Amino acid sequence: MTASPGIVIAGGGMAAGNAAAGLREGGYDGPLTILGAEPDVPFGRPPLSKGYLRGEEDLSGWLVRPAGWYADNRVALRTDAAVASVDPDARALRTRAGERIAYDRLLIATGGRNRALAVPGRDLDGVLQLRTRADCERIRALARPGERVVVAGMGFIGCEVAASLTQLGVEVTAVFPGPAPLVRVLGPEVGAVLGRLHREKGVELIAGEGLAAVEGAGRVEAVRTTSGRRIECSAAILAAGIQPNVEFLAGSGIALDNGVLVDELCRTSAPGVFACGDVANMAHPLFGRVRVEHYNNAEKHGRAAARSLLGRGEPYDYTFSFWSDQYEHSLEYVGFAERWDELVVRGSLEDARFLAFSLREGRLRAVAGLNRGGDPELEADSELAACAALIASGGRVRAELLADEGTDLRQLAPPRPL
Ligand SMILES: Cc1cc2nc3c(=O)[nH]c(=O)nc-3n(C[C@H](O)[C@H](O)[C@H](O)COP(=O)(O)OP(=O)(O)OC[C@H]3O[C@@H](n4cnc5c(N)ncnc54)[C@H](O)[C@@H]3O)c2cc1C
């Protein structure tokens, strides 16, 4: 009898590492292989735009499991072993090096990569993006106090890099579409507050503009914006968001649409193939179809995928949460909202200490807490944990109660563990 090839995980990040840990802790004793495309053991990326970028911490506190855990637990962790194609009918895949690997069940956790900006000059030295440890170290090497760096795009990564570089003494100019940073996720009101915080720290904000070109002879000397403005700089960091890593699934028959389509149990359209983390476009019982690009989801979705792989899955109904640190300011967010028809504020935008509630048709969909609300994952009694419970309840809530400091948010919804 041929031995079972066991479970193979494609991808070596946060979701993959947590799935492997979940499988072993869940009692799976069979062969388990992780095929990754980066040299590192699975780790969390948040410090790459924060403490690690600023040289304040190493990555030891961010490993999913210590490096020795994999061998100790008979997990074959193969870094630099990118998967090139998958054949679900044959239950086999091929690596980029041409090796054929069979599987019983496959978990796709290949995450995302930076979206390329199609601008002239983007290949010049000193034009960088941030996703991996190596990217981070390249940026850190160029972060020289007093020199000017342009950050193009002010989503979370752009904002955090702008903050960290400023803290390192670098002069930062940020160029971004829209009226303020993070408007797409947080709306113009909260975006304006964040813009003000960056400006107060000395970041030059050029709103409503894109990058038209990067100029220089061999290495970047300046960028040109879409309105023709020229900004001299010694480096340019392009932060235009990510796209899911799914190209290797072309021709596999696995249904794709803005990532790998999965149901509430992390199952793809192909029998025996599952997906989780940034790459997975999931059917969520509360939010509909969503692809979430955050650390807490990568961890919990990886764990959920492990349970599903073991046949013990339950519908994944995590309310989602994430955080972002910029300077001394801490943003925590629960829920998921790409559109809302009402934004209600409790607290003070002026003092940058508030909760901002996004409502759609009278239902609370998401809450952003800036320097307020606690950590919804770690503090069960916090305002944001109460908000998560309120979002999960799916019920209607009156805007004036949300705005009223006299109303205890914890009274509005039954407590529910995240
Ligand atoms: C700089 C930075 C800071 C961040 N900060 C925060 C934060 O503060 N808070 C927060 O909530 N989130 C943050 N995030 C987002 C968070 O890191 C991601 O949501 C998380 O990394 C997703 O994990 P993942 O395992 O799904 O995907 P990834 O981390 O993308 O990992 C996927 C892995 O699969 C590999 N891979 C790709 N293609 C293949 C292939 N064909 N075969 C094999 N392997 C492949 C990749 O190389 C990668 O190692 C940050 C992200 C970055 C880049």
Image (cartoon, rainbow, N blue to C red):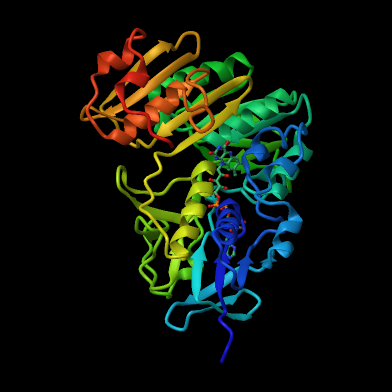
In the rendered image, residue 58, in percent from the top left (x then y), is placed at 76, 39
Q: Is residue 229 above or below residue 40?
A: above
User: Residue at position x 75%, y 28% from top?
Assistant: 147
Question: Residue at the location (68% across, 67% down)?
Answer: 74
- Residue closer to the observer: 348 or 364: 364
Q: Residue 148: x percent and y percent?
A: 70, 28
Is the N terminus in the top left, top right, bottom left or bottom right quadrant?
bottom right
Query: From what the image shows, is residue 42 above or below residue 152?
Result: below
Task: Choose top left, top right, bottom left or bottom right for residue 324.
Answer: top right
| Figure label count | 0
Residue 92 vertical position relative to residue 42 in the rendered view, above or below? below
Q: Inspect this view and state whether residue 154 appears.
A: no
Name the residue rendered at 23%, 19% in the picture: 398
Pick the front one: 138 or 206: 138
Viewport quadrant of the C terminus:
top left
Q: Is residue 353 visible?
A: yes
Lateral position of residue 149 relative to residue 263, left or right:
right
Judged left or right of residue 354, residue 211 is right
Which of these two is toward me, 286 or 70? Answer: 70
Please provide percent x and percent y for residue 46.
62, 39
Judge left or right: residue 66 versus residue 352: right
Q: Residue furthest front?
A: 27
Q: Residue at x 53, y 55 (%)?
A: 111
Q: Residue furthest bottom?
A: 1
